[in-house]
Image (cartoon, helix red, strand yellow):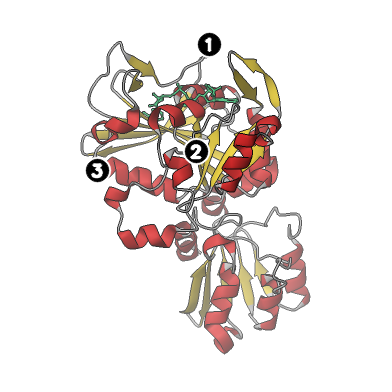
Amino acid sequence: MRAALSLARSAQGSTFPNPPVGCIIAHSHEIIAFAATAPSGRPHAETKALAIAGNKAKGATLYSTLEPCTHKNIHNTPPCCQAIVSAKIARTCYPIQDPDPRTNGACKKILEKNNIIVTENVCPQEASQQLEPYLKRCHRTLPHITLKLAISLDGKISETSQPYRQRQTHISGAKARIYRNNLLRQSDAILIGAQTMRLDNPKLLLDEILISPEETQERHPFASIRIILDGGLTIPLESNLVQTVDHAPLWILTRAAEAASDKGTALKNSGVRLIPVPALSRQGGGVRLSLIEAMHTLAAEGIASILCEGGAKLAHELLSENLADRMILFSAPHTLGAQGLSMLASNNPKRFDFQLEETLTLDQDEIKTFRPQHNNV
Ligand SMILES: NC(=O)c1ccc[n+]([C@@H]2O[C@H](COP(=O)([O-])OP(=O)(O)OC[C@H]3O[C@@H](n4cnc5c(N)ncnc54)[C@H](OP(=O)(O)O)[C@@H]3O)[C@@H](O)[C@H]2O)c1
């Protein structure tokens, strides 16, 4: 099961809208097939492994990191549970039931009816930890959010005079940037606030200095979905985000009225997806959207894991609405001084408590992972 879990880990972030699952088929102490969920979520790991095993699957044991599904997909291919029965597997092991209401324990009943031995609760803690985003999406219709910020020693994320991304190479070293790439690879989506979009004009893709050209090709169209919180639909058509819409999907959370405007139509014609979110109240010149509604909508779209890359206002808002599940701070050995922007910004700043989970030192950078004290999952 631990080997199957490591297969599932390799598929994290590429299987939207399905969870990353690993599967191993073994017979007489020999592994005869292994697979992880395919990019875009289909085929499932079990179906792939059974196809590889062919006739050898008869009488074998199948290990899956999640209860196999009992529902057909849109292409009308049989559910994994049915494929296990047809392959005459002798025993099926998995750690936890699939909370998807279409399965949720139904597989066990079908398998046992067909005289297949079912062993549940194999490595349930490891699997639950790995499937934390999927479980949160199923149980709470909310995505699992990782808040990632690169900070200076004095807790600043940017010099107000200079956009952060123009200095990114100075804030984090090469190893820290590889680590950031891996966080992005493991996430269904990446989110930023409108001000970071306006000031930094980012692409929100993998850091290309550190990946091979083949991987850039390979990622498309399975790259993490780029999401901007932009109530006033201020994103320029000529921004890097819109101009790279062929590299990775771009979704904008905005007001219904903005989505229906001429600018909204122009963006849609450029391949951008606009997602209307209910507005709460006017916020200065801008529009304040309901963040909780926005996150419910994204979860309903199948997004289970989000990496939020700032800025300070969005970070504060996510923490104060209890929407952030972990916070990862990349801290570099310098200060930004009085001109620096604090890592959390609000007109009504709050105190937050965290528990330190892990500290990693990568050359000059220290990467600390914290859990907010309340547990969202
Ligand atoms: N070091 C790092 O890790 C890092 C990472 C990212 C960014 N940064 C830096 O952070 C700075 C920007 O941060 P920031 O705090 O000024 O801005 P921000 O958090 O990036 O964006 C805030 C803006 O997002 C929109 N927004 C946020 N919540 C919203 C809601 N509920 N409804 C509708 N819109 C909402 C609003 O846009 P409107 O103004 O249009 O209403 C708001 O002003 C930049 O200097 C950037 O370089 C640093």
For marks 2 and 1 on the same chain, the one whose residue lies earlier in the sequence: 2
Residue at x 66% of width, y 47% of height: 301
Residue 233, image x, y percentages:
58, 30
Judging by the rendered image, the residue that carries numbered circle 1 is 347
What kind of residue is marked 3? Answer: Ala
Q: Above or below — where is 88 with respect to 72? A: below
Q: Which mark is residue 174?
A: 3
* Quadrant in which residue 144 is drawn: top right
Residue 311, image x, y percentages:
45, 27
Judging by the rendered image, the residue that carries numbered circle 2 is 237
**Rounded to the nearest whole Å, what is the CA distance between mark 3 and mark 2?**
31 Å
In this view of the protein, which residue sits in the foreground, 358 or 234?
Answer: 234
Mark 1 neighbour density, 10 Å: few (under 14) some (14–19) many (20 or more): few
In this view of the protein, which residue sits in the foreground, 352 or 143?
Answer: 143
For marks 3 and 2 on the same chain, the one whose residue lies earlier in the sequence: 3
* Quadrant in which residue 66 is drawn: bottom right
In this view of the protein, which residue sits in the foreground, 123 or 364?
Answer: 364
Q: Is mark 2 on a helix, strand or loop?
A: loop
Is the residue under label 3 in contact with that under label 1 (CB below 8 Å)? Answer: no
Mark 3 neighbour density, 10 Å: few (under 14) some (14–19) many (20 or more): some
Residue 304 visible in the snapshot: yes
Nearer the observer, disc 3 or disc 2? 2
* Quadrant in which residue 165 is drawn: top left
Residue 226, image x, y percentages:
50, 43
**Rounded to the nearest whole Å, what is the CA distance between mark 1 and mark 3?**
35 Å
Q: Which mark is residue 258?
A: none
Nearer the observer, disc 2 or disc 1? 2
What kind of residue is marked 2? Answer: Leu
What kind of residue is marked 1? Answer: Asn
For marks 1 and 3 on the same chain, the one whose residue lies earlier in the sequence: 3
